[in-house]
Image (spheres, rainbow, N blue to C red):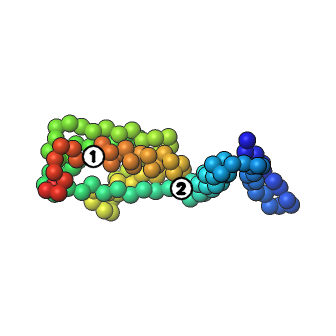
Amino acid sequence: YIEITKVEKGEKSFIKVQKWQGLKKELACIRSICQSIQNMFTGVTKGYRYKMRLVYAHFPINAVINGNKEIEIRNFLGQKKVFRVNMRADTVIEKCNKVKDQLILEGNDIDAVSQSAAEIQCKCKVRNKDQLIL
């Protein structure tokens, strides 16, 4: 198993992650754990922000935000279908007032913010059409 401890020396404290006699794959987990802890610290102190743009050529895409936790995308490629995406965990979505058709996703958890942005992108994927023409 991997041992994670908090070590305090005087006024300074740090987190110690160690694995004894591990295989190559087990030792690779240590770097992943350290990076996850570092992302948590960054998320709490600074936060994460993703910016997305609604880009269209002919049919204007309408985005309606419901209570900072859900977005409805209408008129994507002239479709009547409404695409709804719920934000994950503590992710908040809002429209940018300065830039036209820009969405801003903010939150403390990088996994939740990036997954919410990915879900919006996947819902708006062009299907059954030649993407070179569009």
Q: Quadrant of the C terminus?
A: bottom left
Which SS class for mark 2?
loop
Find the residue positioned furthest to the right.
10
Residue 131: percent from left, percent from top: 19, 53
How many angstroms separate mark 1 from mark 2 (CA)?
A: 26 Å
Neighbour tally class for label 1: few under 14, some 14-19, many 20 plus, Cα within 10 Å: some
Query: At 50% from the left edge and 40% from the top edge, which residue is drawn?
Result: 89
Residue 34: percent from left, percent from top: 65, 54
Of mark 1 and mark 2, the one earlier in the sequence is 2
Camera-side residue: 25 or 105?
25
Give the label on residue 75, or none: none
Residue 49: percent from left, percent from top: 46, 56
Residue 75: percent from left, percent from top: 18, 44
Q: Describe residue 3's horizontal placement relative to residue 84 as left or right.
A: right
- Give the residue type that dot 1 points to: Cys
Q: Of the residues tagged 1 and 2, which is closer to the observer?
A: 1
Task: Judge whether residue 78 can be spotted in this image.
Answer: yes
Which SS class for mark 1?
loop
Give the label on residue 47, or none: 2
Q: Describe residue 5's horizontal placement relative to residue 59 as left or right.
A: right
- Give the residue type that dot 2 points to: Gly
- Asked if 84 appears above or below 31 in the picture, the reply is above
Query: At 59% from the left edge and 57% from the top edge, which residue is drawn?
Result: 42
Camera-side residue: 125 or 97?
125
Find the residue positioned furthest to the bottom.
98
| Mark 1 lies on residue | 124
